[in-house]
């Protein structure tokens, strides 16, 4: 039974890595919150207690990986917070050992470390930071402060998280800047032989593939600084859809 759940969850993670249509189907579903509740059911203490420590770790790891896919996708960040993403993260922290792969060389396999990356990503972009404040995320994650810091003991991420959410305005990249994200992608490449969360052009019909690890990466939207584009042409083609999320004037030529 454990192997069945783990195999199914692993397939779900692999599908979510590159499929925007998958997350769109959850977003548009009337049972969106039920989906997140089902994810949380896999973290019930009684359910995990019936598994070996290795299997329990895989459950936490794959669920944290799903959370990363949501947090790093332009099209899913906001609605996922409302749908139950924060409760899922809290449940993962709750069921994770206090010290789990805190060494830098092993962090790619730590559920708590991946959850930290989700919080960093969401708190460094003002629209999602506002969502975190509205959901009282500081109080929700305060019980897990020790585990959050334990995942990255040298940087004390909890204090950074508090600073960001208590500030009046967030500057994108204050914690999880472009250089840090490049290092994160390289770590994923080394561990898994591929990027865990590939950055792709936001125009869904683009065939350019994922953003290169080295050389010039995709440019960000000059307004929201979240949507990525391989070219000015694809930015213009995507604007009819993106403006619903960006809520700003089209990016200028200089932004590309």
Image: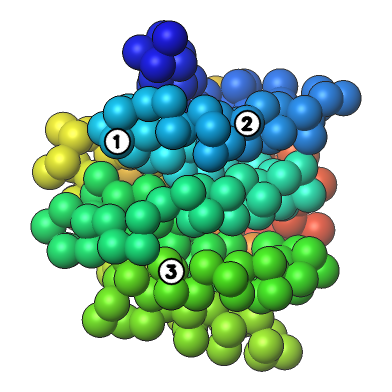
Front tag of 1 and 2: 1
Residue 23 drawn above or below residue 169? above
In whole angstroms, how far apart are the C-alphas of marks 1 and 3? 20 Å
Label 1 neighbourhood size at 10 Å, few (<14), some (14-19), many (20+)?
few
Label 3: element kind: helix
Q: Nearer the viewer, residue 64 or 50?
A: 50
- Check disc 3 and report the residue beneath it: 148
Please, which colouring scheme is shown? rainbow
Residue 73 in view here: no
Hey, which quadrant is residue 8 in on the image? top left
In whole angstroms, how far apart are the C-alphas of marks 1 and 2? 17 Å
First-in-chain label (3 vs 2): 2
Whether tag 3 and tag 2 are in contact, CB under 8 A, the answer is: no
Hey, which quadrant is residue 1 in on the image? top left
Outermost residue, right side: 30
Report the number of discs. Answer: 3
- Check disc 2 and report the residue beneath it: 41
Which residue: 37% across, 82% down?
156
Residue 39 drawn above or below residue 118? above
Left or right, residue 111 beside residue 172: left
Which residue: 71% across, 22% down?
25
Label 1: element kind: helix
- Check disc 1 and report the residue beneath it: 53
Whether tag 1 and tag 2 are in contact, CB under 8 A, the answer is: no
Q: Which mark is residue 201?
A: none
Whether tag 1 and tag 3 are in contact, CB under 8 A, the answer is: no
Left or right, residue 228 beside residue 184: right
- Position in image of residue 217 (x %, y %): 32, 53
- Position in image of residue 182 (x %, y %): 27, 59
First-in-chain label (1 vs 3): 1
Which residue: 28% across, 56% down?
100
First-in-chain label (1 vs 2): 2
């Amino acid at each position: 039974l454990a192997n069945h759940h783990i195999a199914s969850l692993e397939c779900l993670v692999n599908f979510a890595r590159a499929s925007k249509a998958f997350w769109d189907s959850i977003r548009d579903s009337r049972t969106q919150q039920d989906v997140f509740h089902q994810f949380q059911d896999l973290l019930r203490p009684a359910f995990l207690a019936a598994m070996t420590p290795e299997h329990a770790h895989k459950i936490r790891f794959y669920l944290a990986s799903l959370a990363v896919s949501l947090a790093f996708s332009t099209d899913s960040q906001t609605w996922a917070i409302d749908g139950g993403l924060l409760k899922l993260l809290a449940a993962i922290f709750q069921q994770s050992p206090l010290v789990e792969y805190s060494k830098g060389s092993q962090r790619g396999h730590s559920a708590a470390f991946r959850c930290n990356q989700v919080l960093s990503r969401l708190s460094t972009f003002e629209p999602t930071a506002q969502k975190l404040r509205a959901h009282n995320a500081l109080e929700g994650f305060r019980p897990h402060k020790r585990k959050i810091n334990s995942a990255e003991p040298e940087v004390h991420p909890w204090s950074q998280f508090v600073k960001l959410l208590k500030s009046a305005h967030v500057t994108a990249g204050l914690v999880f800047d472009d250089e840090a994200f490049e290092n994160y992608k390289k770590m994923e490449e080394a561990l898994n032989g591929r990027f865990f969360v590939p950055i792709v052009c936001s125009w869904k019909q683009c065939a350019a593939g994922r953003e290169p690890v080295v050389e010039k990466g995709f440019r960000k939207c000059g307004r929201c600084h979240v949507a990525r584009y391989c070219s000015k042409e694809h930015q213009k083609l995507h604007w009819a859809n993106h403006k619903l999320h960006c809520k700003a004037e089209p990016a200028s030529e200089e932004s590309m």
